[in-house]
Image (cartoon, rainbow, N blue to C red):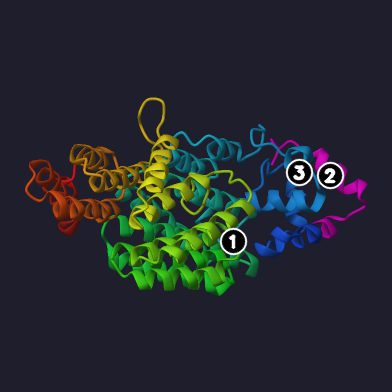
Amino acid sequence: MPDSIPNVQLRAWRNAQQLTRAEFAERINRTPVGIKERLAVDEERIRRWEAGEVSWPRAPFRLALTQATGLQPEDLGFSPTKRGSGNSRLIEAHIMPVDALRAEADLYGTMELAQQLQASDVGTGTLEALAEAVDLLCRAYPVVPAATLRDRTQKRLAQVTRLLSGRITLDQHRELLVITGWLTALLGCVHYDLGEREEAETARQAAYEMGRQVGHGELMGWAHEMSAWFALVEGRYEDVVTAARQGQALAGQSSAQVQLTLQEARGLARIGDRREADKALSRGADILAKLPIPENPDHHFVFDHAKWVFYAATAYTWLEDNDRAEEHALETIQMHTRPDGTSNAPMRVADAHIDLGIVHARRGDLDAAVEQGMAAFDIERKSLTDLVNRAGDLDRVLRQRYRREALAEEFHDRYTTARRALTTRRLDLFD
């Protein structure tokens, strides 16, 4: 690659340690991250790093490099903004995803993946670019319409699947299966958001199977988390707890482990087991505290403190712990509201408004309860399935306590319109 700028710092560090490229690769593979992620760094990858063909390795490799050398990637000559590398536009899109889908499309154009996908073999650059593209799609989940994200994900999944039939090594086959697994899990989520339950379950099972084939505990954990989520929406609360606990046994110390623990808490809250729900919430917080601060907290398969607050708000609402529910719901709205009033996580904010509506209804403030409920509908939310489910919680409370009140009936009409839209998949009724 003639435009690449050699990484002299990385080469100098290796030479100072008197390590061959093969020895350096093995040291990286034997780090805790290398073992957990089953990294397969080889001499060729080290050569590409030293040649400057990769200016900013993917997150697992960066973490493993730090563990192997005791230095940050920047101190080893890597840079997320370095020019001259063939994937510089990819890096910029990863760091500053103003429009995640546009960045993902630019990535495919920059890496000329359309041409590479026609080839009979797979280069390391292709795999790294594909992994970054999946990250961008997962980061688009909170703000991109579900139908748009479904179509883009299906398109990319078809392209990636074609690579599996090409001439590839065992390590490349494994990496492609992991990439395909994440894409399939994302597809299952957007299918479910659109009310396409059969398609969602098929994708969920496929993601689990890919994780099982390569021994990827976190991917299998997320597949169980999807099962817990589906059960929660469908009112199968014992199944929520069962699926969440099964996933925890596989996920290891990861974002999936935290989310599974919080799903367990929500399932227990629905059942009314306050003691065990509180224990699960605390356990989830403890696991989260041990994880590194995520580089991209907007990634759908990443759990951070803001997500814990959001999950806790709903759990406390179901436990009828009104004060704590209100505190966490207000914090969720505050964290995810931009200065111009728009939201960077509309689904979470809409749920928080529903939680506040339920709290106000219990306290006897019908006006505030309906105001919060209507606010949830007014947000440009991306998941109609979850909204209808949560709005149903508020509607039941309002009809129990204020059945003959005009405001309660007004909210009921809005809720039934949305439910009909979901049932018929006529999303125009919701707009």
Residue nearest the observer in this picture, 288 or 86:
288
Q: Is residue 8 magenta?
A: yes
The answer to whether residue 78 is left or right of residue 404 is: right
Which residues are the magenta region?
A: 1-24
Assign the N terminus to one quadrant of the image. Answer: top right
Circle 2 SS class: helix
Disc 3 is placed on an element classified as: loop
Q: Going from the N terminus, do you reach mark 2 or mark 1 first?
A: 2
Q: Nearer the viewer, mark 3 or mark 2?
A: 2
Q: What's under tag 1, amino acid-wise?
A: Asp
Q: Secondary structure at mark 1?
A: loop
User: Pointer 2: residues within 10 angstroms few (<14), some, or many (20+)?
Assistant: many
C-alpha gap between disc 2 and disc 1: 28 Å
Place of residue 143 in the rendered image (x, y in percent of width and height, measured from the top left): 38, 42
Circle 3 is placed at which residue position? 51
Residue 342 sits in quarter: top left
Q: Nearer the viewer, residue 310 or 167?
A: 310
Where residue 121 is drawn, which disc sits there?
1
Q: Amino acid at mark 2?
A: Arg
Q: Residue 140: x, y in percent?
A: 42, 44
* Residue at 74%, 36% in the rendered image: 5
Instruction: Work out how far the residue at label 3 is from the one at label 2, CA to CA, in angstroms.
Output: 9 Å
Q: Say if the magenta span includes residue 224.
A: no
- Under mark 3, the amino acid is Ala
Q: Residue at x 55, y 48 (%)?
A: 132
Of mark 3 and mark 2, the one earlier in the sequence is 2
The percent coordinates of residue 214 (x first, y second) are 58, 71
> What is the total number of numbered labels drawn onto the structure image?
3
Q: On the picture, is 331 further left or further right than 82?
A: left
> In the rendering, which numbered label is found on residue 192?
none
Q: Which residue is mark 2?
A: 11
